[in-house]
Image: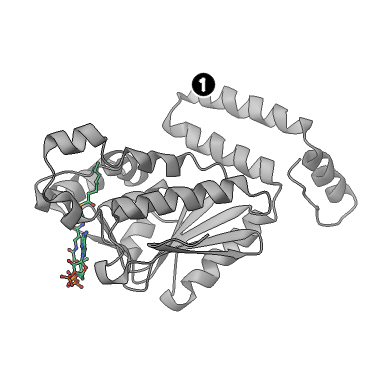
């Protein structure tokens, strides 16, 4: 399958997806959304694939939603088409995925990166929600996910002033899992993805469901959900294999069953 706005590569059990609109700094148009949701769904449906990495270019992960596409739209256009509601499909991806960010991750770019299960940044990464300067506000979850990630004080400051945050501050604030040198970003992301891909896939999907549940549930509900999922994994062959492998002092060979 080929796409107009992204490149998709299978590297063993890891799908590497790269935004490919260099002239527009990977601005997220409706075409990007269509390509990306299809690529993510294809990864989810492919038993040989166990993790996905989403990245951009050295200069920009993505510089936001496509301002040129949005500029002429009316309220009726936006509301009628439920503009960009399709991005939520990305967050329904069941397999774990990593956003590997170099350069600008602004507006919708920052919001897509925050949809990832794990966010890794190059030391060149710049995060921001500058929508206020355009007369709008974050529209793909930024006001919610940024606040969850870094707390109200900093999120409010960034969203109201439109100021950007560099990689070191993003790491210190809890937005990103780690910062790596720009020239090793893909290697580091792939290494992490391969580690996850070698884990029992059902447990990996269940683990991300449980962690993401913290966004939706009370503590009591979340703990109950976690326990039920934990119990459920005793119905898998991979649990038997994982615990046998531990006793036999060998690496587990996980089948996703
Ligand atoms: N949309 C469209 N085109 C863009 C975008 C964008 N977001 N960002 C950059 N480009 C284009 C530029 O227009 C330029 O094209 P051209 O050469 O044809 O003029 C090309 O990319 C290169 O950009 P610059 O010349 O500006 O490059 P610089 O290195 O000088 O600056 C910046 C880089 C700082 C990243 C600058 O391009 C910039 O500020 N970009 C806009 C950032 C921004 O405001 N992003 C937020 C967009 S709004 C948004 O994301 C809302 C999301 C929610 C929508 C959900 C709706 C429901």
Q: Quadrant of residue 6?
A: bottom left
Q: Residue at x 57, y 51 (%)?
A: 43
The image's colouring method is one colour
Q: Is residue 81 left or right of residue 51?
A: left
- Give the total number of marks visible in the rendering: 1
Q: Position of residue 177 (x, y in %)?
A: 46, 56
Q: Position of residue 129 (x, y in %)?
A: 22, 52
Q: Position of residue 247 (x, y in %)?
A: 88, 48
Q: Is residue 99 left or right of residue 146?
A: right
Asked whether 69 or 14 is in front, the reply is: 69
Q: Quadrant of residue 163?
A: bottom left
Asked whether 213 or 223 is in front, the reply is: 213
Q: In the rendered image of this protein, does residue 195 appear above or below residue 95?
A: below
Outermost residue on the right side: it is: 248
Q: Residue at x 53, y 68 (%)?
A: 188
Q: Is residue 190 left or right of residue 67?
A: right
Q: Residue at x 37, y 68 (%)?
A: 102
Query: If the picture is divided into quarters, which one holds ligand 1?
Result: bottom left
Tell me the SS state at disc 1: helix
Q: Quadrant of residue 104?
A: bottom left
Residue at disc 1, CB closer than 8 Å to ligand 1: no
Q: Residue at x 10, y 53 (%)?
A: 133
Q: Residues within 10 Å of mark 1 (few under 14, many from 20)?
A: few
Query: Is residue 174 in view?
Result: no
Tag 1 residue: 220
Q: Is residue 75 left or right of residue 236?
A: left
Q: In the rendered image of this protein, does residue 152 appear above or below residue 190?
A: above
Q: Position of residue 70 (x, y in %)?
A: 17, 49
Q: In the rendered image of this protein, does residue 205 appear above or below residue 232?
A: below
Quadrant housing the C terminus: top right
């Amino acid at each position: 399958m080929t796409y107009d706005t992204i490149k998709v590569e299978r590297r063993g059990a890891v799908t590497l997806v790269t935004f490919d609109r260099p002239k527009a700094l990977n601005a997220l148009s409706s075409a990007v959304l269509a390509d990306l949701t299809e690529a993510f769904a294809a990864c989810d449906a492919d038993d040989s694939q166990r993790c996905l990495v989403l990245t951009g270019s050295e200069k920009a992960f993505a510089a936001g939603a496509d301002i040129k596409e949005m500029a002429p739209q009316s309220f009726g256009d936006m509301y009628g088409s439920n503009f960009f509601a399709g991005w939520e499909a990305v967050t329904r991806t069941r397999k774990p995925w990593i956003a590997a960010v170099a350069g600008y991750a602004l507006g919708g770019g920052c919001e897509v990166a925050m949809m990832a299960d794990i966010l890794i940044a190059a030391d060149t990464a710049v995060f921001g929600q500058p929508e206020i300067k355009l007369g709008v506000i974050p529209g793909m979850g930024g006001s919610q996910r940024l606040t969850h990630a870094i707390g109200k004080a900093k999120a409010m400051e960034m969203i109201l002033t439109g100021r950007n945050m560099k990689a070191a501050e993003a790491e210190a604030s809890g937005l990103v899992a780690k910062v790596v040198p720009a020239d090793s970003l893909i290697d580091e992301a792939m290494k992490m993805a391969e580690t996850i891909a070698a884990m029992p896939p059902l447990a990996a999907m269940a683990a991300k469901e449980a962690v993401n549940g913290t966004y939706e549930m009370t503590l009591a509900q979340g703990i109950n959900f976690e326990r039920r999922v934990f119990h459920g994994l005793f119905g898998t062959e991979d649990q038997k294999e994982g615990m046998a492998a531990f006793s036999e002092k060998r690496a587990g060979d996980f089948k996703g069953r």
